[in-house]
Amino acid sequence: MKKIILLSLLLTNVIICISQNSTCGFKINDKSFALKDFDKNISAYINLESTNFRSTITIPVVVHIVWNLPEENVDDASVISQINALNRDFNLENSDTFKVPQEFKSLIANIGFHFCLASIDPYGNPTTGIVRQKTNKILNNIFDILYYSSKGGSDSWNSDKYLNIWVANIGTQISGLGSYPLGVPKDQEGVVINYKYFGINNHPIYGLGRIAVHEVGHYFGLKHLWGDVNDCSVDDGVSDTPPQKEAHIGCPSYPQVGCSSSEMYMNYMDYVRDQCALMFTEGQKKRMLATIELYRNQLKSTNQSCLEVSNQINFVNSIYPNPSLEKFRIKFNTPLNRLLYYKIFDISGRLLVSKSELINTYLDVDLNSYNSGVYFIIIEDKAFKLIKV
């Protein structure tokens, strides 16, 4: 087995996990947060049996896409697919649990977290929950740049009310990182995902959106199964995940024994490939529920408005200005809240634009690069005339 290299970056208190197959960053700021106290508080809360499942907890999400090259500017469809992947795996809707060995099947848990893109920003304005920030900075693992617009990144939204997810080119060795509760400054709380592994895509190893599932697990208080120490005496603090000596990579064959029993390498908190990561356990569920109650309570109780993908098309309310020199705003009667497909044609019927965007209350169309004249925009099966002067 290829060894996992652990780098401790003392200046930033970032623990980075690196291998040739799976990479993860796991952030703990020792100056502001005592990990032992966290574990003690979580264990005490679980022992009080206060983590009984009640109802689905809704988590509003904002996705910050910080890009330099065009391929780093992932599209809206990728964002939606990542939200769907989180909901799939945190709500036991994945169809591949049949691959879980029989000895672990009874431990598979439905966490009951529902993730959705925020539809209202911190200032009360409608939003799609996606922020795009072009940068001239080469990030390459320099995360302090990523979190601040003044440095070329994207400022977080209030981390008490939103789960912030940053998507960027963070180099070739790190796939992502998740911040522990209170482990980093408030404006750096959230999850970072390498753009190559974001969403459901065609990546042969990490194409199912499970890098984000792993990192969101950290965000809600989960450790790696082996406790980040290659020693059977250290574990992840979860009672129903067996002791594990070290990380697993690739797609191991069953069983794998490193300590005294079969190891749960198919857990989301190991380093296996996406197609072999299949489950959270009931113990991990209790730890995440305890974490959200004790350390992220405001996140679940803010009653933030969420954007849900809808199959209903709403009628256009207005197009203004029309005629226009270059830019048109198409407003809908009610929030559309969906991925919208549209095409733009010139008067001769020549197709100029064919794309999809995640739309809330309006669609902006820019014809600046085209000549004056009459154009038609087809929003799914409805056509509207645009006049550029």
Image (cartoon, helix red, strand yellow):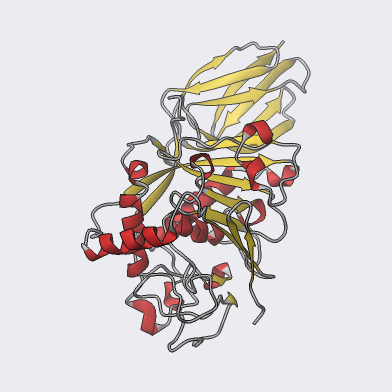
Viewer-proximal residue, 90 or 99?
90
How many labels, in total? 0
Using residue 204 as the reference point, say whether residue 27 is left or right of it. left
Tell me where residue 368 sits by quadrant. top right
- Residue found 40% across the figure and 67% down from its top: 280
Residue 118: horizontal and vertical position, in percent?
44, 37
- Residue found 36% across the figure and 49% down from its top: 295
- Residue found 43% across the figure and 78% down from its top: 100
Tell me where residue 137 sits by quadrant. top right
Viewer-proximal residue, 235 or 160?
235
70 is higher (above) or lower (below) than 365: below
Residue at the front extreme, as displayed = 31
Residue 110: horizontal and vertical position, in percent?
34, 63
90 is higher (above) or lower (below) than 142: below
Residue 91 visible? The answer is: no
Residue 144: horizontal and vertical position, in percent?
64, 43
Residue 143: horizontal and vertical position, in percent?
64, 47
Quadrant assignment for the C terminus: top right
Using residue 11 as the reference point, say whether residue 229 is left or right of it. left
Residue 162 visible? The answer is: yes
Quadrant assignment for the N terminus: bottom right
Viewer-proximal residue, 5 or 381?
5
